[in-house]
Amino acid sequence: MSSNILAMMLGVSTFLGALGLLALLWGLRTGQFDDQEKFLESAKYDTEEELKDAIALEKRKKKIIQKKKKKEEKNYSPPD
């Protein structure tokens, strides 16, 4: 590789790294990562019934997806 290409690659990678660092610092400064209370509050009010409902909902979703896949397999016809 020529030194011009290496210098260009070094410059671009340094610029992108600095851009990423600035984005991280901006996020920290504006409070983009301050979700501690939300996480703790959501865990505090979870009950067994809510968790069981969530599991039942996930099972229903999986069954519906499986039914759709089976239906698509039955109705499959190759393209003309």
Image: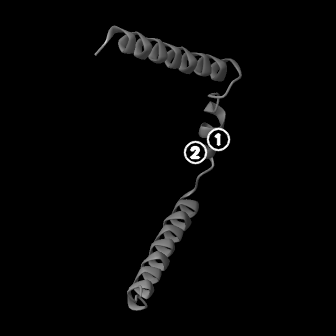
Q: Which mark is residue 56?
A: none
Viewer-closest of 65 and 23:
23
Viewer-closest of 62 and 21:
21
Q: Could you tell me residue 34's position as x and y percent?
A: 65, 28
Is residue 5 placed above or below 52 in the rendered structure? above
Three-letter code, disc 1: Glu
Three-letter code, disc 2: Ala
Q: Badge 1: few (under 14), some or many (20 or more) residues near its Cα, within 10 Å?
A: few
Image quarter in which the C terminus is found: bottom left
Residue 71 is drawn in which quadrant? bottom left
At horizontal 39% and vertical 91% (from top left) the residue drawn is 74
Is residue 14 placed above or below 30 in the rendered structure? above
> How was this image coloured?
one colour
SS at mark 2 in the image: helix
Q: Could you tell me residue 9's position as x and y percent?
A: 41, 17
Image quarter in which the N terminus is found: top left
At horizontal 38% and vertical 85% (from top left) the residue drawn is 73
Q: Could you tell me residue 56's position as x and y percent?
A: 50, 71
Viewer-closest of 53 and 9:
9
Q: Residue furthest left?
A: 1
Looking at the image, do the residues carrying marks 1 and 2 touch, with CB atoms under 8 Å apart? yes
Is residue 79 placed above or below 53 in the rendered structure? below
Q: Which residue is mark 1?
A: 41
Q: Which residue is mark 2?
A: 43
Q: Badge 2: few (under 14), some or many (20 or more) residues near its Cα, within 10 Å?
A: few
Viewer-closest of 72 and 34:
72
At horizontal 60% and vertical 16% (from top left) the residue drawn is 22
Is residue 69 placed above or below 21 in the rendered structure? below
Residue 70 is drawn in which quadrant? bottom left
Tell me the CA gap for discs 1 and 2.
5 Å
